[in-house]
Image: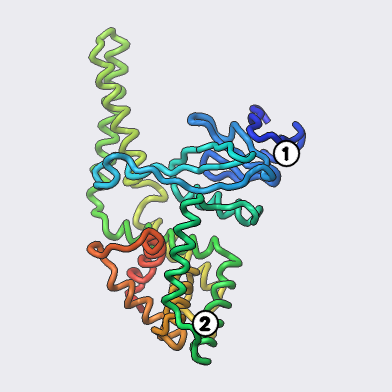
């Protein structure tokens, strides 16, 4: 261990134990989850602090919007944070680049330490209110046929939850393919041209600066800005970010899911729709009395997704569900 993480919690680890735990921790963006400690970042350095898991009382995600984030015109639409509360009142906030890294860390932390609360106090209150409102939507008693369908769907959901990475891969591949299909190829080549022009401006600026011309610094700064901006925008054609590679990943993700659940007629959804969120929405349709079987519940989910478009407003929780599964249905033509 080159750099020893700084202890934040009152309870710490022995140096040898700390070194082994950090070496084997699961990394999520700039932070990590070990067997004995949670490793946190500073603004510049990854995993430079640690809090023992026994000291963590609450860990949750916070998303801050830039001023233009609410209008869609800001350079940074949102900034995700991990907030950790420990030792009866101490708090550490860690900035992340990708929101999904915070979600994955919290999922891993919840699996390892079920006693740690994964929502803020305000979020827990809102979730409790939402649970009461949602419970009021459900029927008090289901018909025997509907109850059998609900149990079948819950068993299928448990099956998928045994290998969550397969459903995540399927959803991620579908989103990437849908985005690639909707984008014009010319945009990628324009971005590549700008990056190459930025590299040329950088080289020209450095050459002028070496010769003593101060204007070369402006060319160098412009070139660097163009290269960093378009490289981080993920629109450049690369070995992984091109139409053929994205289509191959989509096919391989579907094949992996089919190999896991098989072409069994007893599974309530086709393998290309096999995602826990799909099954959860089907269960809701049954509990609301909108469906009496798994097949009719899937039809209800398809109809609901078809009705959702850019003009429809939904709550954040439903939005998070829809963005995971709607690309699956769009790519497969709602078959």
Q: Position of residue 321 (x, y in %)?
A: 41, 64
Task: Out of 147 and 136, give the one closest to the viewer.
Answer: 136
Instruction: Give the side of residue 226 with respect to residue 57, left or right.
Output: left
Task: Out of 122 and 308, give the one closest to the viewer.
Answer: 122
Q: Which numbered disc, 1 or 2, marks the residue that appears first in the sequence? A: 1
Q: CA distance from mark 1 to mark 2?
A: 45 Å
Verify CB contact (< 8 Å) between mark 1 and mark 2: no
Farthest residue toward the top? 212
Camera sees residue 286: yes
Above or below residue 226? Residue 174 is below
Camera sees residue 248: no
Check disc 1 and report the residue beneath it.
20
Colour pattern of the rendering: rainbow
Q: Residue at x 29, y 68 (%)?
A: 308
Res. 90 image quadrant:
top right
Structural crowding at the residue carrying mark 2, measured as other residues with C-alpha within 10 Å and reported as few (<14), some (14–19) or many (≥20): many
Q: Position of residue 56 (x, y in %)?
A: 63, 44
Which quarter shows the C terminus? bottom left
Instruction: Give the side of residue 130 with respect to residue 208, left or right.
Output: right
Above or below residue 290? Residue 88 is above
Which quarter shows the N terminus? top right
Q: Residue at x 46, y 41 (%)?
A: 96
Badge number at residue 2: none
Q: Residue at x 26, y 45 (%)?
A: 189
Check disc 2 and report the residue beneath it.
150
Instruction: Give the side of residue 257 with respect to residue 177, left or right.
Output: right
Above or below residue 297? Residue 45 is above
Task: Out of 238 and 183, give the one closest to the viewer.
Answer: 183
């Amino acid at each position: 261990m080159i750099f020893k993480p700084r202890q934040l919690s009152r309870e710490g680890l022995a140096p040898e134990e700390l070194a082994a735990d950090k070496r084997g921790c699961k990394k999520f963006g700039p932070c990590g989850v070990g067997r004995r400690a949670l490793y946190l970042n500073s603004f510049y350095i990854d995993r430079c602090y640690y809090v023992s898991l026994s000291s963590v009382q609450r860990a949750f995600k916070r998303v801050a919007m830039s001023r233009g984030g609410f209008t869609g015109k800001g350079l940074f639409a949102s900034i995700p944070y991990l907030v950790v509360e420990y030792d009866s009142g101490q708090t550490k906030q860690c900035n992340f680049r990708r929101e999904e890294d915070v979600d994955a860390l919290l999922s891993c932390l919840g699996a390892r330490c079920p006693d740690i609360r994964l929502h803020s106090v305000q979020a827990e209150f809102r979730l409790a209110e939402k649970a009461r409102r949602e419970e009021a939507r459900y029927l008090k008693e289901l018909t025997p046929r509907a109850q059998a369908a609900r149990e079948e769907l819950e068993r299928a959901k448990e099956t998928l939850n045994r290998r969550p990475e397969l459903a995540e891969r399927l959803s991620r591949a579908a989103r990437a393919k849908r985005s690639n299909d909707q984008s014009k190829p010319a945009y990628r080549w324009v971005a590549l041209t700008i990056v190459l022009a930025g590299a040329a401006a950088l080289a020209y600026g450095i050459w002028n600066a070496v010769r003593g011309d101060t204007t070369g610094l402006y060319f160098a700064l412009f070139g660097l800005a163009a290269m960093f901006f378009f490289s981080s925008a993920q629109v450049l054609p690369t070995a992984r970010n091109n139409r053929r590679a994205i289509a191959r990943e989509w096919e391989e993700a579907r094949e992996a899911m089919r190999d896991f659940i098989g072409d069994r007629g007893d599974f309530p959804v086709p393998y290309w729709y096999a995602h826990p969120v799909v099954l959860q929405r089907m269960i809701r349709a049954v509990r609301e009395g909108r469906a009496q079987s798994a097949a009719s519940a899937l039809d209800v989910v398809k109809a609901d997704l078809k009705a959702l478009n850019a003009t429809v407003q939904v709550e954040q929780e439903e939005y998070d569900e829809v963005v995971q599964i709607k690309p699956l249905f769009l790519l497969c033509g709602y078959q």
